[in-house]
Amino acid sequence: MQTVTEPADPIAPPPSDEAPAESPPTEGAAPESLGLTPAQPEPEELRTRPSYMPKIPWVVVLGLLVAVVSAYSFYQAREAQRSDELRRQLLTTHEEQLAGVSERYQAFRSRIERWTMEVAAAGEPEQHVDPRLRISGLHDGPGLYLRIRATDATSSEAIARGAFAMEQDALTRCLGIAPDSARGLYEHGDFLMPEWADSVEHERDFLRLRVIDEQLARHITADVPVLATMMQARYFMLVLQQGENRRDAPVDVYLWDLQSETQLLAARIQANGVLLPVSIRSMVPEAPDAPLPAHPPSMTSGGANDCSIASQIKALTGEAPVEVDSPIGEGEPEAPPEPPATEIAPAVPSTPAP
């Protein structure tokens, strides 16, 4: 059988390797079957957030926040636990090692404050001197000395402020005695007062409690021996200033025997001393004279007033005060009287012999 081949159409396009085009979609077909995603309305957060801002991963942020809060809470709880342990340790150490010293210190301080407020409230003292008192007998004995303004002797807190402001003077040196300054009693003894334990009870900061712990250790080793020595004083000397200084206003001087708790001295004294400058010539004839000071010393300095008060205290107790007679302020000394003139008899002319 003979096969007949039809001739190719010269107008038909050449064959192509591309896949045949898909047929157009038919009406009513589902979008998913055509590979399309249906359009959805934008969420609220996308409609209110600018398009250039990235989306915030709130789950991660909340997780980190919870972790930070948990860590901080754990740290706070741990610090509170450490603070409680250290606070208990401080109070236990204070109670076991300082209970006896605290009781003695508070009683000693309360006694001198009570005496100070009593005499200040009474006003000008009636002069009183125990006949057994001799200032020279206090030279070797331990004592305590407090000098404050009378306006500060109204309460324990005011007395403490006055004691903190107390400065060194020459009164006790002019008396020849060396009592301890009551300023040290107040500066070194605050940790023995009830307020110290109260402040520790209310302290919550761990670092602050660490500082208090170190301070307490220093108090025990350094301050307790000093305070124990002060509380062995045999006498208490109190000076109440009635004015701003001891030159223009009087002072009230008191002295107590701390062992028998009896008052030995009470007097109001007005300073009236002057400083007498003295120049001493060298025993070596060739030695030059000492140069004069650039500014002459004050004749009414604080030291002169203090020594004047001390001299009057000694006089009250029967000891001879130091006195110097001086013509200062009394005018010029009178000139010595002139010797009487010698009379000379007039010459008598000689009479010629007759």
Image (cartoon, rainbow, N blue to C red):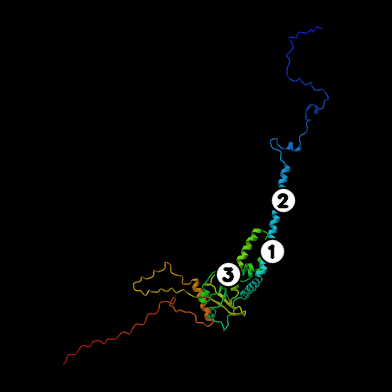
- Given residues 124 and 212, the one toward you in this image is 212
- Quarter of the image for residue 46 reads top right
- Name, please, the residue furthest toward the right: 28
Q: Say what amino acid the circle numbered 1 marks.
A: Arg
* Distance between mark 2 and mark 3 Cα atoms: 50 Å
- Name, please, the residue furthest toward the bottom: 354
Q: Is residue 225 visible?
A: yes
- Identify the element where label 3 is drawn: helix
Which image quadrant: the C terminus?
A: bottom left
- Given residues 268 and 14, the one toward you in this image is 14
Which image quadrant: the N terminus?
A: top right
Mark 2 or 3: in front is 2
* Residue ID for mark 3: 184
* Distance between mark 3 and mark 1 Cα atoms: 29 Å
Q: Say what amino acid the circle numbered 3 marks.
A: Gly
Q: Who comes first in sequence, dot 3 or dot 1?
A: 1
Q: Position of residue 221 (x, y in %)?
A: 60, 68
Q: Position of residue 177 (x, y in %)?
A: 53, 76
Residue that appears at 72% across and 45% down: 63
* Mark sitting on residue 70: 2
Q: Say what amino acid the circle numbered 2 marks.
A: Ser
Q: Position of residue 127 (x, y in %)?
A: 58, 80
* Residue ID for mark 1: 88
